[in-house]
Image (cartoon, helix red, strand yellow):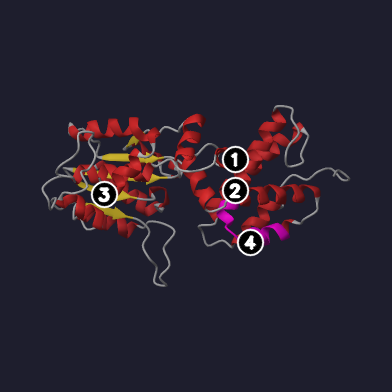
Amino acid sequence: MGAMTVSVMAQPWLAQTWRVLADALATNRLHHGLLFAAPTGLGKRALADALVAAALCTQRAADGQACGVCRACRLVAAGSHPDRIRVTFELRDDGKPRTEITIDQMRALAQRLAMSSQFGGLQLALIDPADRLNASAANALLKTLEEPAADTVMILVADEAARLPATIRSRCQAVEIREPSGEEALAWLCANGVEAAAAAAALDASLGNPGLALRWIEDACVAVRMACAQDLQALASGRHSAVDIADRWGTDRPELRLWFAAALAHDEARRLARGERGTLGLTGRGEIPKLARWSGRANHARGLLATTLRTDLVLLDLMRAWPSLPSGRP
C-alpha cells in the first residue's frame, strides 16, 4: 500500500471525510474545485494527496484508496504522473523559495489544464498553499474556476482559508476535516509511542491539534512554549525589555514563538474570564480585552514574517503592546 494511503489511514479522524471523498470519486461526483482548509497538523495534505493518488489509480482498493502498485501509482509516487499538476512556491533567482504564488503560475496552470489528459482520465491540479496566492494570481485562478475544463479537478490546500477571496471559496466545495476529540487525539499520540503525560502537555500547547503536538514533541518545541511563557511573564513585570525579547525571538523560530504567544494570550484571557489568576502574572479582568487584541496582533505578526518587513521590527512592535503589571507588582 502506498505511503500516502498509510498516512491517511493512520489518522482515524480523517476516516469519515475519506469515505465521503471516495464515494464521490467512485460515482464521478467530484466537484471541479475542492478546498481542503484546516490548521496544519490535522492531515489535510495527506488527505488531498490520497485523493489525487486514488483518482489516478487504475486498481483502487475496496475502500477507494490507491493500490500503490499499478503504473499510475508508481508514477504518482515518483512525482512524474503527467495528469497530476502541482503548483507551489517557485524559486527566486537567488535560489530561495518565493513567499507567494504568482499570476504566471496560474496562467501556466490554465494552459496546462486546457490540454487533454495524457492517460485519458482525470487531470488533477494541486495548489498548495492556496492561501498564499497573490491578488493577481487569485483573479486568474477565479477565471479558471468559473470556466473549468472537462475532466479536471482543482484541489486547493490552505492553512488559513480566510485569506482566500470569498469569490474563490464560493466556487469550491469545502472538504470538512473534523478535529479529533481530546481522548481521540491523546490515544493517537500514545499509539505513536508518546508517553501519556508528554502527550497531554503537547496537546495543551497545540490547542488539541495532534499532528502539531507530535511534531513539537519530536522537535522539543514544548520547551520553547515554556520559554515563551516565561518571557511574557518577565515582560509584564519589567524584568526583561521588549527589545531583549524581540531580539531573542527573532533569531530562534520566530513563527513558532508567535504561534505560542497568541495561544498563551488567548488562554490567559480565558483564565481571567473564569476569575482565576493568570499564569502569566496578570490578574485584572480589565486585561481580558487587551489580551484578546494582543493575541490577534500576534497572529497577524506571524503572517508579516512572510513579507519583506524586518522580523525584529515586527516583533518589537508586538512586544511593546504586551500588557504590563501595575508598578510595584511582583
Q: Measured along the vertical axis of the image, is residue 91 above or below residue 283?
A: below
- Horizontal side of 190 relative to 84 (left or right) equals right
User: Marks 1 and 3, Cα distance to the nearest angstrom?
Assistant: 38 Å
Q: Earlier in the sequence, mark 1 or mark 3?
A: 3
Q: Is residue 91 left or right of residue 329?
A: left
Q: Residue at x 62, y 60 (%)?
A: 250
Earlier in the chain: of badge 4 and badge 1, it is 1
- Of the residues shown, which amino acid type is indicated by label 1? Ala
How far is disc 2 from disc 1 in space, using C-alphas?
Answer: 8 Å
Residue 213: x and y, percent?
52, 43
Residue at label 2? 222
Mark 2: give few (<14), some (14-19) or many (20+) Cα within 10 Å: many
**From the image, which quarter does the N terminus lie in?**
top left
Q: Residue furthest left?
A: 120
Stretch of the chain drawn in magenta: 244-258
Q: Amino acid at mark 3?
A: Ala
Please give the residue where the numbered disc 1 appears in the rendered image: 201
Q: Quadrant of residue 286?
A: top right
Q: Are marks 1 and 3 in contact (CB under 8 Å)?
A: no
Element at label 2: helix
Going from the N terminus, do you reach mark 2 or mark 1 first? 1
The residue depicted at 53 percent of the width and 36 percent of the height is 208
- Contact between marks 2 and 1 (CB within 8 A): the answer is yes
